[in-house]
Image: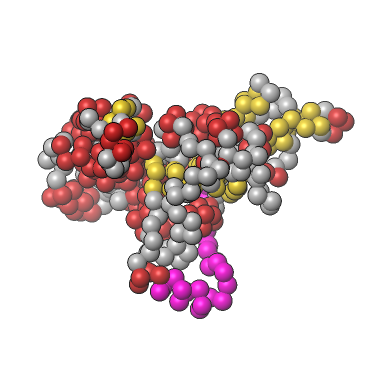
């Protein structure tokens, strides 16, 4: 059931004939890649006050948000999966709702339902999916019918109840978690739903130094959780997403994505390779990473650094490969090794473009 106190789950009902989206935040000025990089640095810096020693993971999740996708966080309990999502909502000023997936959860617990209103007129009571950032905790603990209720929200940014569509607020970002080591009482996500996640990331254990720092901070602050401050608001996040859409990718980078995707389809260890959606997602994530780095153009290194997180969960291994211990990330690494990296955008080119941008007082090459 939705967590008590989840703000979106308590939204007032709206008339059945309504279906209007929440009022949009006031527009903000158009952002340059340099603006995006500055705001992204401030967001990650504030998040690091809560999640210690995991800057690459935080940047990866933020990349998913700025690419207007969704993220599946898969790791063992106790490594700050929930804390990371809740902290991101606080720092970005996004309306937050948490759904604890359980075997008795039904679709209307996510989407909302029709209930009697004033004068016995039916109204639509919004479910917890009507939030900017939704945490689906242990998503693989609910039956497939309930998991599927999130599909329309993730892909279409709307939900349909009683034949009527209701648009979700923007931005809309779903962070789902699951525990990969516990299978009893779980319902594995089907490939169709896995494909809706832009990224699948793991958090991992902290280093010994980071864990010492984590414990030291806990003693010093005298409270269970650190008090984080908002760095941006929903309108800023939407503006950052719009800036990502203006990031370019030349023909060599696009061709590099295509050849990586084709390599997965030809790999003998796979029954099913990456779909065209996988290629689109890889390019979208690479453009978001470029914006986070302050560039208005994507590079092969952006593609290569994100290929595992974007493609691995979209691949289906052959049974014999799985028995041999081959894993999806291994296949992605093999494909990256087999595809030559384009040389049109080398690090020297990037540094020269950055220097020229600074000399001209502008962003980009």
Residue 317 seen in render: yes
Above or below: residue 263 compared with residue 365: above
Left or right position of 232 against 299: right
Give the x, y percent position of residue 44.
41, 58
What range of the chain is rendered magenta? 212-236
Give the x, y percent position of residue 292.
34, 49
Give the x, y percent position of residue 122.
79, 28
- The front one of 161 and 90 is 161
Q: In which quadrant will I find the C terminus?
A: top left
Above or below: residue 52 compared with residue 187: below
Left or right position of 353 against 198: left
Q: Residue at x 27, y 40 (%)?
A: 324
Left or right position of 16 against 290: right
Is 233 colored magenta in this rendering?
A: yes
Residue 303 seen in render: no
- The front one of 334 and 97 is 334
Above or below: residue 231 compared with residue 8: below
Q: Residue at x 45, y 59 (%)?
A: 79
């Amino acid at each position: 059931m939705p967590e008590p106190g989840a703000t979106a789950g308590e939204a007032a009902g709206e008339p059945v004939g309504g279906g209007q989206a929440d009022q949009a935040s006031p527009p903000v000025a158009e952002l340059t890649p340099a603006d995006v990089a500055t705001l992204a640095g401030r967001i990650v810096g504030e998040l690091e006050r809560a999640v210690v020693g995991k800057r690459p993971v935080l940047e990866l999740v933020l990349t998913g948000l700025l690419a207007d996708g969704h993220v599946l966080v898969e790791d063992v309990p106790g490594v700050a999966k929930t804390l990371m999502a809740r902290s991101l909502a606080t720092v970005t000023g996004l309306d937050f709702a948490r759904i604890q997936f359980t075997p008795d959860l039904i679709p209307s617990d996510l989407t909302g339902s029709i209930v009697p209103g004033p004068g016995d007129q039916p109204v639509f009571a919004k479910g917890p999916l009507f939030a900017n950032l939704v945490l689906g905790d242990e998503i693989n603990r609910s039956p497939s019918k309930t998991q599927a209720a999130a599909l329309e929200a993730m892909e279409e940014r709307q939900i349909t109840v009683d034949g009527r569509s209701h648009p979700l607020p923007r931005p809309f970002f779903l962070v789902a978690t699951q525990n990969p080591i516990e299978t009893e009482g779980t319902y594995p996500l089907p490939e169709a739903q896995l494909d809706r996640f832009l990224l699948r990331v793991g958090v991992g254990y902290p280093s010994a130094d980071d864990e010492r720092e984590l414990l030291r901070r806990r003693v010093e602050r005298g409270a269970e959780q650190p008090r984080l401050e908002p760095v941006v608001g929903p309108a800023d996040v939407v503006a950052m997403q719009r800036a990502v859409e203006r990031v370019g990718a030349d023909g060599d980078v696009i061709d590099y994505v295509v050849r990586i995707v084709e390599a997965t389809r030809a790999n003998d260890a796979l029954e099913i390779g990456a779909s065209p959606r996988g290629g689109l997602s890889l390019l979208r994530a690479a453009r978001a990473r470029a914006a986070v780095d302050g560039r208005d153009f994507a590079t092969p290194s952006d593609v290569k650094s994100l290929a595992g997180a974007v493609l691995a969960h979209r691949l289906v291994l052959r049974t014999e490969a799985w028995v041999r211990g081959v894993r999806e990330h291994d296949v992605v690494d093999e494909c990256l090794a087999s595809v030559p990296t384009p040389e049109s955008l080398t690090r020297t080119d990037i540094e020269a473009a950055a220097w020229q941008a600074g000399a001209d007082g502008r962003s980009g090459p």
